[in-house]
Image (cartoon, grey):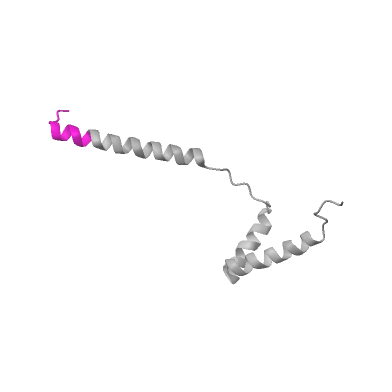
Amino acid sequence: MKANEKDYQKYSDAIDRIQEGNEAMIELFNELEKDNPVISFNEEIMKSINKAKEKYGDEIIEQRINKVVAEMLSWLELTDPS
């Protein structure tokens, strides 16, 4: 393909921008952290949670789940005995 100086510069600039974008994507990828869920619910529980969220809304269900979990954790001795 033949190109004049103007076209050559356009392609060169475009390649530079693509390279900068690639470098930015690689940097973002390298900064990713794996998301490990605190609790893994089984499939049946997840279906029930999703149905409840659809019916009552995310915020209400999340609040209620947090209250239940907080209550359950209160039954455990989580501090080191001195």
Residue 41: quadrant of the picture:
bottom right
Residue name at image x 66 percent, y 54 percent? 43
Where residue 30 appears, x then y in whole percent? Answer: 49, 37
Residue placed farthest to the front in the image? Answer: 82
- The image shows residue 23, relative to residue 63, as above or below, that is above
Answer whether residue 52 is magenta in the image.
no
Residue name at image x 16 percent, y 35 percent? 7
Q: Where are the magenta residues, as a range?
A: 1-11
- Is 17 on the left or on the right of 82, as rendered? left
Residue name at image x 26 percent, y 37 percent? 14
Residue 71: quadrant of the picture:
bottom right
Quarter the N terminus occupies: top left
The secondary structure that most of the magenta stretch takes on is helix
Between 3 and 5, the residue placed more toward the observer is 5
Where residue 2 appears, x then y in whole percent? Answer: 14, 28
Where residue 37 appears, x then y in whole percent? Answer: 64, 50
